[in-house]
Amino acid sequence: MDHSLQELRTLLERIELIIAQHINYVDRLKKSIRVGKAFPHKECTECAFGKLLYSEVWPNKDQYPLEIASLLETIERPHCNFHQKAFEIESVATQEEKLKILKEVEEYSMSLLNPLLSLKAVLKKVIE
């Protein structure tokens, strides 16, 4: 099997888990704000999706079908923005400020979910 096809198959196998982990990350962040505890933030290259994306998928994206490469590019920047915005919560003092940033984090989160679901559909079409 072509190496790049195997990477895409791995991504397809993991994408539902990645989406679930992303939603869980947001839920844990909300809870940490609600109870007033520090949140163990991760860089966009450190979460499960980021590790897979940057170590196995992104380096070879130019070898993938254009539709997949385009979706990966659509996902990459908002994914990092999502993590950067989540980090900002720790830099503000008031609950009101934290909740305002959380709203932005949730917006980034939603902007990621549709392209991730589209990527899943395209991967299925290409691989299966």
Image (cartoon, helix red, strand yellow):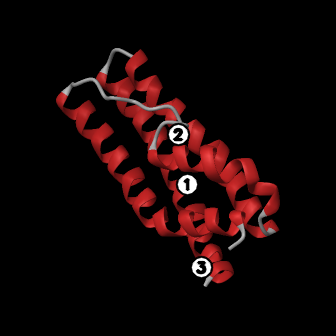
Task: Say above or below: 20 vs 31.
Answer: below
In the drawing, does residue 66 fall left or right of residue 19? right
Whether residue 93 is situated above or below residue 10 in the rendered picture: above
Residues at circles 3 and 2 in contact by the CB criterion of under 8 Å: no
Looking at marks 1 and 3 on the same chain, the residue that comes earlier in the sequence is marked by: 1
Spot occupied by residue 42 in the image (x, y as percentages of width and height)? 44, 32
**In terms of secondary structure, where does tag 1 sit?**
helix
* Label 3: which secondary element: helix
Q: Position of residue 74 (x, y in %)?
A: 70, 54
| Numbered marks: total | 3
Q: Which mark is residue 124?
A: 3
Q: Is residue 84 left or right of residue 17?
A: right
Residue corresponding to mark 2 = 82
Near mark 3 (Cα within 10 A), the count class, few <14, some 14-19 or many ≥20, is some
Q: Are marks 1 and 2 in contact (CB under 8 Å)?
A: yes
Numbered circle sitting on residue 9:
none
Q: Residues within 10 Å of mark 2 (few under 14, many from 20)?
A: many
Q: As displayed, is residue 16 above or below residue 30? A: below
Q: Tell me what residue is drawn at x 55 percent, y 50 percent.
A: 52
Residue under label 1: 112
**Residue type, mark 2 in image:** Phe
SS at circle 2: helix
What percent of the width, then of the height, locates residue 122?
Answer: 65, 75
- Graded by Cα atoms within 10 Å as few (under 14), some (14 to 19) or many (20 or more), the crowding at tag 1 reads many
**Upstream in sequence: badge 3 or badge 2:** 2
**Residue at 54 percent of width and 37 percent of height:** 44
Specify the quadrant of the image occupied by residue 38: top left
Q: Amino acid at mark 3?
A: Lys
Residue type marked 1: Leu
Residue at x 22%, y 25% (from the top left corner): 37
